[in-house]
Image (cartoon, grey):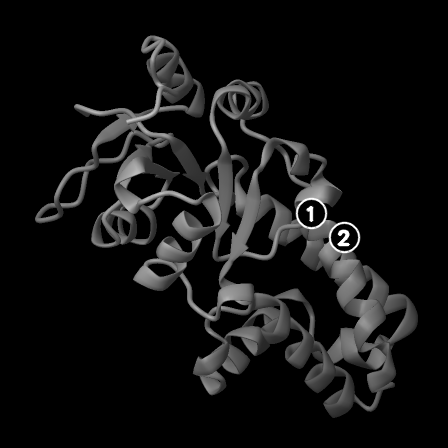
Amino acid sequence: METLPRALSLDLDDTLWPIWPCIERAERALDDFLREHCPRTANRYPVHRMRRLREEVAAEHPHLVHDFTEQRRISLARALETSGDDVARTDEAFAVFYAGRNQVEFYPDALAALARLSARFPVAALTNGNADLARIGIDGHFHCFVSARDQGHAKPDTPIFLATCERLGLHPAQVLHIGDDPLLDVMGARRAGMRSCWINRKKDSWPLGLPRPDLEFATLAGLADWLESHPDATEPR
């Protein structure tokens, strides 16, 4: 990378924490809630069937591909209604699920690395998910939060990346996007004119035929180390 970034945009799920343990924890909490308060729904929609229902709802509502929250709420309302339970419980049931979804377990390096990065650069959170940074306790590290739900576009679509650069007040070429997904993060950022860093925690091979990222590290700490080795990283360009 010949010139260094003025700001960073950072993916959340599977970059700062693994997402599936969060989802599984949330699903179990929701199932426990339903078994106590809406037993007919719990019996008709155990965890695996509730998951399938959400997938069906997503397929039926392609315009909500960017909005996991609304997909989940529609799924819960449908499950309650078809089971003969009170649809008015939808908000309460979703709140239980959402609390579990935000009980994240950070990768060992992630919090310290995030603190190092945010001490030197403006950092935008850029996510297709619906994490709540304040609940998780890391909102103070971010200049702004850009989500697919708020933008009406999901990664890898160019508009969400450009919206992030606009929030940062910078040209796309001045922003380095960091994430775990070769297509959603790296290719999406490249198409928007941003630079890209692949966090490859699983030590996967890069997909054949795709242009490589500008940077690649096994951990977020690796990126923080690399940027700290360039003391002029925050100088105006």
In this rendering, position of residue 170 left or right of residue 63: left
Q: Secondary structure at mark 1?
A: loop
Mark 1, residues whose alpha carbon is within 10 Å: few (<14), some, or many (≥20)? many
Task: From the image, tell me which residue sits under label 2.
Answer: 99
In this rendering, position of residue 162 left or right of residue 53: left
Question: Residue 147's spot in the image, x, y percent?
Answer: 52, 57
Is the C-beta separation of discs 1 and 2 under 8 Å?
yes
In this rendering, position of residue 204 left or right of residue 26: left
Q: Which of the labelled discs sits on residue 102, or is there none?
A: 1
Outermost residue, left side: 209
Q: Who's the residue at 49% across and 65% down the image?
A: 151
Rounded to the nearest angstrom, the CA distance separating label 1 from label 2 is 5 Å
Question: Amino acid type of disc 1?
Answer: Asn
| The one of 130 and 232 positioned closer to us in this rendering | 232
Splitting the image into 4 quarters, where does residue 119 fall?
Answer: top right
Question: Amino acid type of disc 2?
Answer: Ala
Splitting the image into 4 quarters, where does residue 220 fall?
Answer: top left
Question: Residue 107's spot in the image, x, y percent?
Answer: 54, 28
